[in-house]
Image (tube, rainbow, N blue to C red):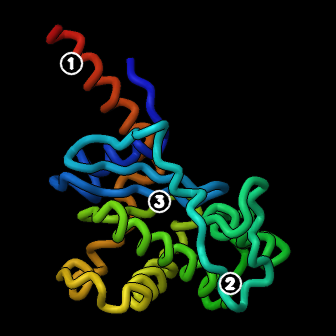
Amino acid sequence: CAIDTDVNAAVLAEATLGAARGLSSAVYVTVGTGIGGGVLVDGQLVHGLLHPEVGHILLRPHLNDPIPKGVCPYHDGCLEGLAAGPAIGARVQGDARLVLDQDPVFDIEAYYLAQMCVNLILIASPQRIILGGGVMERKALFPKVRKETVRLLSGYIQHSSILEGIEEYIVPADLFPISGLMGAYLLGRKAYEKERRV
C-alpha cells in the first residue's frame, strides 16, 4: 500500500493518463470546498517537510473584494480563504452555484486563481497547470484565469507555453472527478511493483 495526499494522487493520475500525459512536471490544483495542490517535478511527487500546501499561499486582495481577508480560520488573505467555494458563497451571500457566469464575483475569483498560477509558474516552473474541483466545473472561469495570469506575469516569463499556448498550459483536469481515485490506484500499483522487485 501507499499513502499520499488526494491531490498528489490526482497529479500522478493526470500525468500518467490525463491532461499532463507525457510530461515530467505538472501541478494539479483542486478548487472546491477547500483548495489543495499536488506537485510533480521530474516525474516525482513533491513531499518536502510534509507536502505542498498550495491552498494556503498568501495573496494580494482584489480591490473590489468585500471580504479581502477571506474566510480561512488560520490565515488572512490565503488562497483557500479567498478562492474556495465558501469564499465565493460569502461574497454573494448565498449559493455561488446559482450565480451567472457574468457576475463580477468571478472576476475576483479569476484574479485569485491567476495569482496562484503565477506563483506556481515562478516557483515550480511546471510544464502544465491542471485545475479541477467543483468550482472549476464553471468552464467560463478558465479564459478569465488564463488572461489574468498572462497580465500578472507582464511578459516576465518568455516561453511559448505562456505567450502563445496559454490555452494548453492552464487546463481542466481530464479525469475529474476521479483523478484522485485513479491516482490512488496508481500509487498502490507502484508500491506493489516495488515490493515485488525487493
- Asked where in the image residue 92 lies, by quadrant, the reply is bottom right
Lower sequence index among marks 2 and 3: 2
Residue 148's place in the image compared with 170, above or below, is below
Q: Amino acid at mark 1?
A: Glu
Lower sequence index among marks 3 and 1: 3
* Residue ID for mark 3: 132
* Residue ID for mark 1: 193
How crowded is the residue under tag 3: few (<14 C-alpha within 10 Å), some, or many (20+)? many
Lower sequence index among marks 2 and 1: 2
Q: Secondary structure at mark 3?
A: strand
Q: Amino acid at mark 3?
A: Gly
Q: Residue at x 19, y 80 (%)?
A: 159
* Residue ID for mark 2: 105
Q: Secondary structure at mark 2?
A: helix
- Asked where in the image residue 70 lies, by quadrant, the reply is bottom right
Looking at the image, which is closer to me, 10 or 152? Answer: 152
Left/right placement of residue 69 relative to residue 139 reads: right
Left/right placement of residue 34 relative to residue 70 reads: left
Residue 113, given in percent of the width and then of the height, sits at: 52, 73
Q: Residue at x 28, y 24 (%)?
A: 189
